[in-house]
Amino acid sequence: MAPTVPSVRLNNGLEMPVLGLGTYMATEEEGVAAVKMAIDEGYRHIDTAYFYQNENQVGQAVRAKIAEGVIKREDVFIVTKVWNTFHAPEHVEQACQRSLDNLGLDYIDLYLIHWPMGWKFAGWTADDLLRMNADGKSIDSDVDYLDTWKAMEKLAKSGKVKSIGVSNFNSEQLTRLLANCEIKPVTNQIEVNPGINQRKMIEFCRKHDIVVTAYSPLGRPNMDDPVVGNAGIPKHALDDPRVVAIGKKYGKSPGQIVLRYLIELGTLPIPKSSKLERIRQNIDIFDFKLTEEEIKVMDQFNTGCRTVPFNFSSEHKYFPFKLEY
Ligand SMILES: NC(=O)C1=CN([C@@H]2O[C@H](COP(=O)(O)OP(=O)(O)OC[C@H]3O[C@@H](n4cnc5c(N)ncnc54)[C@H](OP(=O)(O)O)[C@@H]3O)[C@@H](O)[C@H]2O)C=CC1
Ligand SMILES: O=C1CO[C@H](CO)[C@@H](O)[C@@H]1O
């Protein structure tokens, strides 16, 4: 029987499953197949983004599983994100409508501002999402994320999106947003894995009733990412004999130990996999708990080193990683 994933209550009263499927780089048939497998295996939270160019595939898989009677629309929590080039308030609604059209759904469960930095609008085609200056730096706009947020609030009020949140915001940006918003973000989606365990950001968010979604939870083993490359990837806890030993005790793989650690930290991990065996493993983490000693072992991997440093936008006034958290 597929494991049942617990949910967390968000600050707007809605429920969000504490584990989801990541889909970055799961495009074309691979994306459709991964999401279908994941739904069959019990996943009820899928993370995508306009930028990933696979909303179409995610939607196709979700709609197929609804048609087969495996799930109802309300059983599955779909997250997508507004891209950096669409931060101008007049583009946000159209960006959201494009995501809805790609997904083929009537509403999005959670819509995020993907990054705090706005980039110059360069059209709606896929080729224009990552256009750089000759020096390899992002072509920035000066749109304030507070203005983008106002447009997000309008979407929440329209019912097109049930919840709104942010991604890659630092604590100063969140503080400024919280002081100026009508609707609070329900989540901050950030990188969390043993190499960067984000304890300070998690505590900050807990105080403000914001959940932390953990992206790149496994530290992207083997991923050859065309956007940031592999330059920043820290040494993986996955290969470490201490993690292997903890896994042996519970009959779990190192990946499962890492994901369980992120659950113990109070985050919501969204591991990406397109392989049935790993899709199965990554959700099978709700029948054991790590001891305090084991959590301390996992804490030893924290160096603060990022897998997704996003340095090509480091000169932007809203680049978030100038602060520790
Ligand atoms: N908001 C943001 O800016 C960002 C959001 N994200 C989101 O977070 C999701 C997850 O992060 P992502 O960057 O993909 O990295 P992950 O840490 O999830 O790593 C994914 C890689 O790990 C492999 N893998 C999956 N499960 C296991 C396992 N149990 N043991 C060993 N290897 C495994 C996958 O390969 P295979 O498919 O072959 O199994 C894939 O190559 C993304 O897909 C995306 O949805 C990610 C980055 C930034
Ligand atoms: O969500 C994301 C997936 O990874 C990409 C690059 O590594 C990021 O650009 C992006 O924010």
Image (spheres, rainbow, N blue to C red):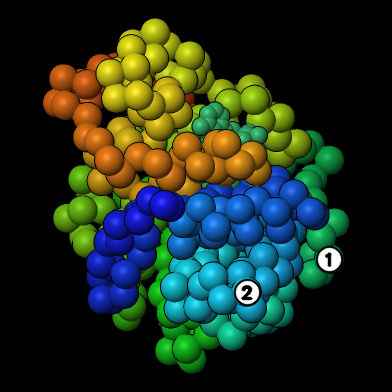
| Foreground: disc 2 or disc 1 | 2
Q: Residue at x 48, y 56 (%)?
A: 43
Q: Mark 1 points at which residue?
A: 125
Q: What residue type is labelled 1?
A: Thr
Q: How crowded is mark 1: few (under 14 residues within 10 Å), some or many (20 or more)?
A: few
Q: Is residue 207 left or right of residue 163?
A: left
Which residue is farthest left? Answer: 292
Going 22% across and 25% down the picture, which residue do you hit? 295
Question: Of label 2 and label 1, which has the lower sequence position?
Answer: 2
Task: Kindly identify the residue that appears in the image at 36 percent across and 64 percent down.
Answer: 16
Measuring from the top left, give residue 243's x and y in whole percent: 36, 17
> Residue 121 in the image: x percent, y percent?
73, 66
Q: Quadrant of ligand 1?
A: top right
Which SS class for mark 1? loop
Q: Which residue lies under the disc numbered 2?
A: 68
Q: Where is residue 254 in the image (x, y as percent from the top left)?
A: 42, 23
Asked whether disc 2 touches disc 1, contact meaning CB atoms under 8 Å apart, the reply is no
Residue 196 placement, left or right of 38: left
Q: From the viewer's perspective, is residue 201 above or below residue 261?
A: below
